[in-house]
Image (tube, grey):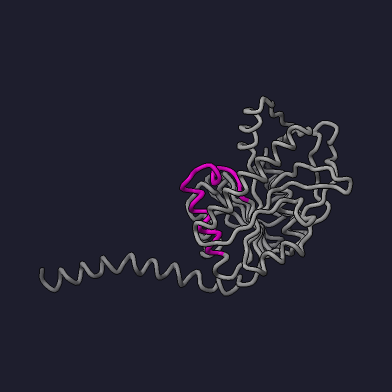
Amino acid sequence: MDNLECNEVNRARKAPQAAIGQVLIEALPYIRKFEGKTFVIKYGGSAMKDACLRNSFAQNVTLLRKVGINVVLVHGGGDAITRTAEKLGLTSRFVQGRRVTDKEMISVIQMTLAGKVNQDIVQLISEHGGKGVGVTGLDADTIMAVPHQNAETLGLVGEVVQINTAYIDLLCHAGLIPVIAPIGFDEKGNIYNINADDAASSIAIAMKAEKLIYVSDVEGIHVGERILKTICKAEAAAFIEQGIISGGMIPKVISAFSTLDGGVGKIHLIDGKSTHSLLLEIFTHDGVGTQFIAEQD
């Protein structure tokens, strides 16, 4: 092999290394900016069902914690609850996307969501070098709730009225990753099933989080074939009026801007089916999903 051929081979070898180096350099200002900040992450959808995606997510969350970001994880688990209920001979019913929850079903939710689902996530984070700790809304009065406005139909489904941020802060300051199962309670000792999106939003507002990140099965807000990188409230209102944003996406968008109004810095909607989407959204200029902001610059 002559010198010309050697130079070509060396350049080919260096190209991937240079690309990796550029990604790391691009991430540096974001790492510095977010050190010590709090991110609330709502974890659900396909990212919870596929083994490779679960591992990728656990790696991402652990890395965020290792670079100094306080990570608070709120998880769903509806499919697991339905499977457990079926094994026990219980039928799952839903009204407007919310699970009808009687006393038997709330026991299943506690057993499944606060049990196996929660602990599986904690264990996976541990396997990747993180320090997760399982939490339910019942621990240290973390999530106080009242009956849902449609309680006559939904049963023991609750709405969040108060978050014990002191307990969550204590865990974060100890270098831990709180993994929260969205179960709440009221002053009478009743236990409630809480929608995970709602719980994550309430926790993010109460903690004045820098970011609330929804990891779901949605790539972001589509306008035609394009995924919007950023959307502000005025644009969202116009897109809803024009029918560009429609169906089940409307309540998600409205909830996102309500959370922004509550004092959270930014909301992100990313696709959990894409490997390492969490890191790519946070630590690269272009991101991979849609971020919600109050106003365009």
Residue 51 vs residue 283, the one in the foreground: 51
Residue 16 vs residue 149, the one in the foreground: 149
Could you say where residue 212 lies in the image, as x and y percent from the top left?
Answer: 66, 58
Could you say where residue 203 lies in the image, as x and y percent from the top left?
Answer: 74, 57
Q: Is 51 a magenta residue?
A: yes
Residue 223 can be seen in this image = no
**Viewed as shown, does residue 130 lie left or right of 111?**
left
Q: Is 271 a magenta residue?
A: no
Determine the main secondary structure of the stretch shown in magenta: helix
Quadrant in which the C terminus appears = bottom right
Which residue is found at the position 60% from the left and 46% from the top?
Answer: 44
Q: Residue furthest right?
A: 188
Q: Measured along the vertical axis of the image, is residue 227 above or below residue 172?
A: above
Q: Measured along the vertical axis of the image, is residue 137 above or below residue 147?
A: below
Q: Measured along the vertical axis of the image, is residue 217 above or below residue 162?
A: above
User: Where on the picture, by quarter, is residue 168?
Assistant: bottom right
Which residue is found at the position 56% from the left and 62% from the top?
Answer: 282
Residue 123 vs residue 267, the one in the foreground: 123
User: Where on the picture, by quarter, is residue 174?
Assistant: bottom right
Residue 37 vs residue 11, the one in the foreground: 37
Which residue is found at the position 82% from the left and 31% from the top?
Answer: 153
Could you say where residue 68 lies in the image, as x and y percent from the top left?
Answer: 59, 70
**Viewed as shown, does residue 184 lie left or right of 285?**
right
Could you say where residue 63 lies in the image, as x and y percent from the top left?
Answer: 52, 64
**Viewed as shown, does residue 231 lie left or right of 141?**
left
Quadrant in which the N terminus appears = bottom left
Residue range (magenta):
43-64
